Amino acid sequence: MKDSFTEINIIPLVDIMLVLIVIILMTASFITTKSLRVNLPEAQSSQAMPRQHIRLEMAQDGSLAMQGKQITLDELAIHLSGRNREDDILISTDQNVTLQRFIHVLDYLKKENFSHISVQTRK
């Protein structure tokens, strides 16, 4: 009489592993929050932002992104037009961005009456 467990069928194991790989790859893409490569400047004192915020990112080359989507300064006006002026804005800017480019964006936000503006740094 032949034993029924003489061979191991690995096809179900391979199927499960492939499904797990797909799940891991799909969830890993949601973990990344930044769309631009930003090297944050350092600061000795910093605080966490208590409320939800609008995230602006400025890369070293001066490119701009809002909430992870790359935009131009002109498109920033369109994206902010329907927003509440009391919303918090968090600017993540690369430490090598020219001061003039940063001031240009900051000046635009102030001109549009956004008053809750913060700059993200690292300790």
Image (cartoon, rainbow, N blue to C red):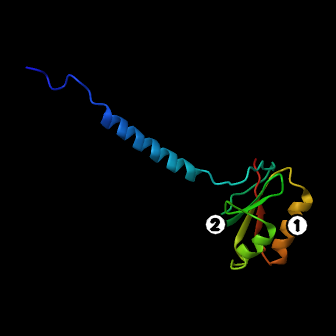
Kindly report which numbered mark, 1 or 2, lies closer to the viewer in this rendering: 1
* SS at circle 1: helix
Q: Amino acid at mark 1?
A: His
Residue 47 at x, y = what percent? 72, 57
- Tell me the residue that label 1 is attached to: 104
Q: Quadrant of residue 11?
A: top left
Identified at 90% across, 55% down, the residue is 98
Residue kind at label 2, given as amino acid type: Gln
- At horizontal 76% and vertical 50% (from top left) the residue drawn is 38
**Distance from the alpha carbon under mark 1 to that under mark 2:** 24 Å
65 relative to 78, above or below: above
Q: Quadrant of residue 101?
A: bottom right
Residue at horizontal 92 percent and vertical 61 percent from the top = 100
Q: Which mark is residue 52?
A: 2
* Residue 97 place in picture, x, y as percent: 86, 54
Residue 99 locus on image (x, y percent): 91, 58
From the top left corner, tell me how far across and down residue 19 is, in percent: 40, 44
Q: Is residue 54 left or right of residue 3?
A: right
Q: Nearer the viewer, residue 113 or 71?
A: 71
Question: In the rendered image, which quarter is residue 75 located in?
Answer: bottom right
Left or right of residue 83: residue 31:
left
Q: 94 left or right of 7?
A: right
98 displayed left or right of 14: right
Q: Is residue 115 above or below residue 95?
A: below
How many numbered markers are drawn?
2
Q: Could you tell which of marks 1 and 2 lies nearer the N-terminus?
A: 2
Q: Quadrant of the N terminus?
A: top left
